[in-house]
Amino acid sequence: MRIDIHCHVAGNGKDISNIENNVYFLAEDNQHWFTRILYNLFEKEMEKFEADLNKDGMISTDEYFNLIYNLLCESKETDGVVLLALDAVFSQKTGKLNKKETDLWISNKFLFKKVKELNQRLQSEENLELREKRFFFGASVSPNRKDWKDELSFVINETDAVLIKLIPSAQHIELMDRRHEEFYKTLASNSMPLLCHVGPEYSFPEGIRNMQLDHYKNLRKPLDCGVTVIAAHCASPVFPVIDKNFMQDFFQMMKEYNKGGKIKLWADTSALSLSSRIPYIKEIRKTFPAKWLVHGTDFPIPIDGWTHLPFITDNITPSEYIDIVRTKNPFDRDIKIKHCHGFSDSILENTEKVLRLNNVE
């Protein structure tokens, strides 16, 4: 099965007390000038897909899920998509909710319910090929939560979650904190992999303010506790010159943890199609073996096609370039871009080796 391990959820709920029924998104009280620009770009990206069905000028939560559903159904390259929850910001000292610095909250109960609805919708399709497609539930539990044991128990025992997703900077999580060891050991004992953002985070105001929390070295604590970790974006920089390039150092750490044949530390290829990452694609392809990589898009982060110019950005031919820019489906476009840059198609199947699929119906 060809699975996208890294797909985000969007919505426009403003009531933080209603997180079990809607996506909570409110950045106005904690905004950063860069994210203000970025969120406007996201909105324009959604407009390209005509996601605003009622033409009210914004993309509602239901409209976004409808878009994601249609994109998977129309995709010729993708069989499954992992939709990612995102837990709120909780105080590292008290474990209480930090409402002001929580810009996006996609609760586990809400997303688990939505994923079930999407899969029921797929099963009702007349087209048998569409019935074979699937959405997967990617949960998110902050170890800073006062009640993390209860929330994690719900995810592990009452849902079919295939992974746990964390963005340390945006969620104020010190991965190396010894207090989180029990959290990691619970993940490990239940074969629950951790998909963790690594490298610069520009999508959240708190991500920009706390970038040190996303350093690849912080993955050592969960790894040493036995957790299988997927490092998002191959720990690559986002912007040349501005961001430091730690990829070679990260690769040495991958070799350290993956010796002996068992892969404990994976990397995903999400957001590598972003225009600003083009200068790093060749290095990523040559550095990281395909057997340690899994496929991800990072949608709705823009999946740029026209910027991957033939011969200039890599060995892409004119015919391949034309095929890329003519491909409207972003899931398919991302796969074609990576294929043309020389990434093995095997990274699409590798995802099944990592996800916790035992409880998935």
Image (cartoon, helix red, strand yellow):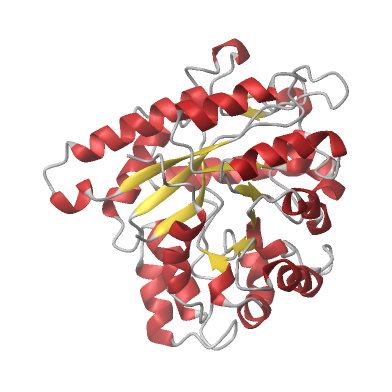
Note whether residue 43 is visible.
Answer: yes
Could you tell me residue 49's position as x and y percent?
A: 39, 47
Q: Is residue 85 above or below residue 3?
A: above
The outermost residue toward the top is 17
Q: Front-most of 323 and 105?
A: 105
Q: Front-most of 294 and 193?
A: 193
Could you tell me residue 283's position as x and y percent?
A: 68, 80
Could you tell me residue 15's position as x and y percent?
A: 59, 13
Could you tell me residue 55's position as x and y percent?
A: 38, 29
Q: Residue at x 64, y 31 (%)?
A: 141
Q: Quadrant of residue 139?
A: top right
Q: Front-most of 188 and 59?
A: 188
The outermost residue toward the left is 126
Q: Residue at x 44, y 43 (%)?
A: 47
Q: Is residue 54 left or right of residue 248?
A: left
Note whether residue 50 is visible.
Answer: no
